[in-house]
Amino acid sequence: MSLNSHKKEISLFRYAVLAGILGTMALPFTAMAQNPASTAPTGNPIIKQKYTADPAAFVHKGTVYLYTGHDEAPARQERYVMHDWLVFSSTDMVNWTEHPSPLAVKDFTWAKDDAWASQVIERNGKFYWYAAVEHATINGKAIGVAVSDSPTGPFKDARGSALISSDMTPDDKISWADIDPSVWIDEKGQAYLFWGNTTCYYAKLKPNMTELDGPINKVPLPNFTEAPWVHKRGDWYYLSYASGFPEKIVYAMSRKIEGPWEYKGILNEIAGNSNTNHQSIIDFKGQSYFIYHNGAINTDGGSFRRSVCIDYLYYNKDGTLKRVVMTTEGVKPAK
């Protein structure tokens, strides 16, 4: 979600050019109530009453829960303004119900601001929310973990301190290296946390899901920018991530979650009117889905007001992934 230091200095002219080239997907913004009971199925983007970004989804008891960031930058301001996270649920991938925001930066008393990318996972009846924020006393970004008895919250800080902070990855020379957490629990019950910007890291988690269980390791990946996401199908693990700038989503495959990972290429091209992208991949009712963000309803300029979209994901016979086709129609109701 963050930009490298030289990227932060990109001129407004470049944003304007990108918007002109890539903004053909743009749709008129539809003003809706701030907290509607549900959203009308009108294709991509799937949420139109608010700006949403950095989607992370999982399936629990026949329902998909979608967690997103919440862009609130004032019109024409070229910066991320994000104070809380949002949650939506659906039983068909088309009709989405919005729930009250169950987590905000202020719920982490040690954090300063910046409700950046996150992911929620269930273990033993509890729901653990891993979220990137700006640390209040340790320079740079950090990852916290909150916990709840319900996928819709409310969530509370599970530690009272950061799980990952910049003093734990001192080799990185950028202050936003520790962002974009992604969590996976393997068939043996071992949990793994992946994260990073410019360097991809992973570490094992203890069964309590709130402590590291061993050293922090680096994952050698070509042109890694950020947004790691781990999923599995059959005997293959997939590690997709944002690459380059503006960002494309690429992926690697491995027989083991700890690697080695073999780079396979582009999965999702640059998303319209957005310099960043951030993906979530799930299976639901026999179909695979690719969830991402673009700037399709952004009429206020720049690349800091994003919207979540969903399209289908398909596999080749050899297990490799077919390139995702981005559409305005989106997906049909899952049955």
Image (cartoon, helix red, strand yellow):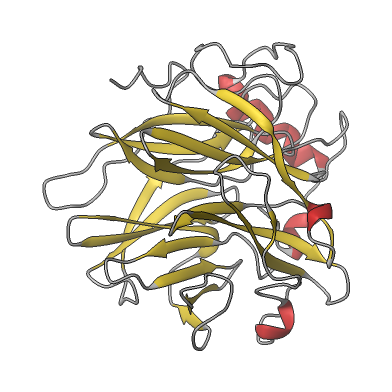
Residue occupying image coordinates x 32% and y 66%: 186
Position of 243 relative to 323 (above/below): below
| Residue 132 relative to residue 128: left or right | right
**Residue 108 location, quadrant:** bottom right
**Residue 70 location, quadrant:** top right
In the current view of this chain or complex, which residue is farthest to the left? 317
Residue occupying image coordinates x 40% and y 41%: 59
- Viewer-proximal residue among 67 and 246: 67
- Viewer-proximal residue among 132 and 266: 132
Residue occupying image coordinates x 76% and y 44%: 84
| Residue 220 relative to residue 111: left or right | left
Q: Position of residue 279 (x, y in %)?
A: 49, 46
- Viewer-proximal residue among 170 and 126: 126
Q: Is residue 268 visible?
A: no
Q: Is residue 85 visible?
A: yes
Position of 192 relative to 50 (above/below): below
- Viewer-proximal residue among 214 and 180: 214
